[in-house]
């Protein structure tokens, strides 16, 4: 993904149950890149109403502070609503489409038409809520083989779509996979690689699924690093203790950046001498490799990495 397509790049996405006000308040003070305030699977049916009310109030209280101080550092604020077509979806949207909201996470999407239905509702609700038209972005969760099969069409169904999120647990259920996952999750390699490829083709961010055992730091580290190697731009998480590790996994290391700088310098020097492709460290340097190095340096600059 090119940097012009990730004006706001999010490495870490933390689910926060909407019916737990203390957790909502705490999440706003963390260094997670984005918070997913939840009204869907993370909330019991009896608490749905409480969740949407508390999320709406949290957003409304934060909005004037953000307006008064645009430099105020908070996580991006997304809300995971109930699935498209669910009887509670319209009530969710009525409450949470309010100033302070940056985006919605749509769960269990399988067709482009589901995205376009929400797009139409947002087109109607934004002006009424005093939100700039088109400003609410969409993170689309694909959680089934059918959703994965339609991934590219879904990702390009609306200009509001900023990313795809892989629903690993639901997907694993569909494939009847074992409950226990290893850090190097080889059982989902094909699905995750296909997912990333579709997101890249659509020029949107790709968010990997959660590592469910928040006490297993080593497993999380292996999984997050593998996610980055597969091409994901970030991953979702379920506990504040996972934030730093996930952010680090999706940030270029100092060794990587040093190598990229040397690649670019060697190539630029060769060009100044009128040469084309050159040998560098036993490897042939041509434009695709140099472009990747420049892209990683641009990403590091965006993230403030050294």
Image (cartoon, grey):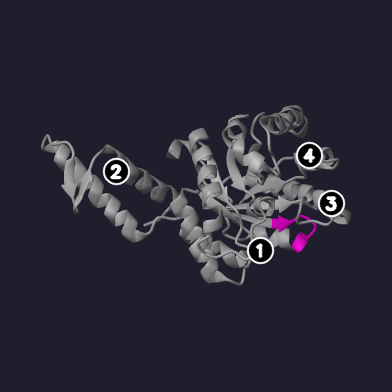
Above or below for 251 versus 182: above
Contact between labelled residues 1 and 2, with CB atoms less than 8 Å apart:
no
The residue labelled by disc 2 is 289
Please report the bounds of the magenta region as a residue range. Answer: 16-22
Q: Is residue 20 magenta?
A: yes
| Residue 159 locus on image (x, y percent) | 60, 30
Contact between labelled residues 4 and 2, with CB atoms less than 8 Å apart:
no
| Residue 25 locus on image (x, y percent) | 71, 59
Question: How far separated are the C-alphas under marks 3 and 4?
Answer: 12 Å
Front position among marks 2 and 4: 2
Front position among marks 2 and 1: 1
Q: State the residue in front, 301 or 282.
A: 282
Question: How far separated are the C-alphas under marks 4 and 1?
Answer: 33 Å
Question: How far separated are the C-alphas under marks 3 and 1?
Answer: 28 Å
Q: Residue at x 78, y 39 (%)?
A: 93
Front position among marks 3 and 2: 2
Res. 12 visible in picture: no
**Precedes in sequence: disc 3 or disc 4:** 3
**Precedes in sequence: disc 3 or disc 2:** 3
Question: Is label 2 in a helix, a strand or a loop?
Answer: helix
Quadrant including the N terminus:
top left
Question: How far separated are the C-alphas under marks 3 and 2?
Answer: 49 Å
Q: Dividing the picture into quarters, in which one does residue 163 lie?
A: top right
Q: Residue at x 73, y 48 (%)?
A: 59
Q: State the residue in front, 224 or 125.
A: 224
The residue labelled by disc 3 is 48
The residue labelled by disc 1 is 179
| Residue 104 locus on image (x, y percent) | 69, 42
């Amino acid at each position: 993904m090119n940097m012009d397509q990730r004006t706001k790049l999010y490495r870490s996405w933390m689910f926060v149950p909407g019916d737990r006000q203390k957790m909502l308040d705490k999440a706003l003070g963390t260094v997670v890149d984005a918070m997913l305030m939840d009204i869907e699977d993370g909330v019991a049916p009896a608490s749905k109403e409480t969740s949407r009310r508390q999320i709406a109030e949290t957003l409304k209280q934060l909005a004037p502070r953000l307006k008064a101080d645009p430099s105020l550092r908070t996580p991006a604020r997304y809300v995971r609503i109930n699935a498209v077509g669910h009887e509670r979806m319209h009530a969710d949207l009525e409450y949470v489409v309010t100033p302070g909201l940056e985006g919605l996470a749509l769960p269990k999407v399988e067709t482009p038409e589901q995205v376009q239905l929400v797009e139409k509702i947002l087109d109607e609700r934004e002006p009424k809520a005093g939100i700039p038209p088109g400003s609410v972005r969409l993170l689309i969760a694909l959680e089934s083989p059918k959703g994965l099969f339609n991934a590219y069409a879904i990702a390009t169904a609306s200009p509001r779509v900023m990313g795809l999120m892989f629903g690993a647990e639901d997907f694993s259920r569909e494939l009847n996979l074992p409950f226990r996952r290893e850090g190097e999750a080889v059982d989902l390699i094909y699905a995750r690689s296909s997912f990333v490829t579709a997101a890249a083709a659509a020029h949107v961010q790709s968010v990997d699924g959660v590592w469910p055992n928040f006490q297993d730091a080593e497993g999380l580290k292996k999984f997050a690093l593998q996610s980055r190697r597969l091409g994901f731009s970030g991953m979702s998480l379920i506990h504040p203790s996972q934030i730093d590790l996930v952010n680090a996994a999706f940030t270029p290391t100092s060794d990587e950046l040093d190598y990229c700088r040397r690649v670019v310098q060697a190539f630029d020097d060769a060009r100044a001498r009128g040469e084309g492709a050159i040998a560098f460290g036993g490897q042939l340097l041509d434009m695709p490799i140099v472009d990747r190095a420049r892209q990683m340096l641009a990403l590091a600059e965006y993230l403030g990495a050294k």
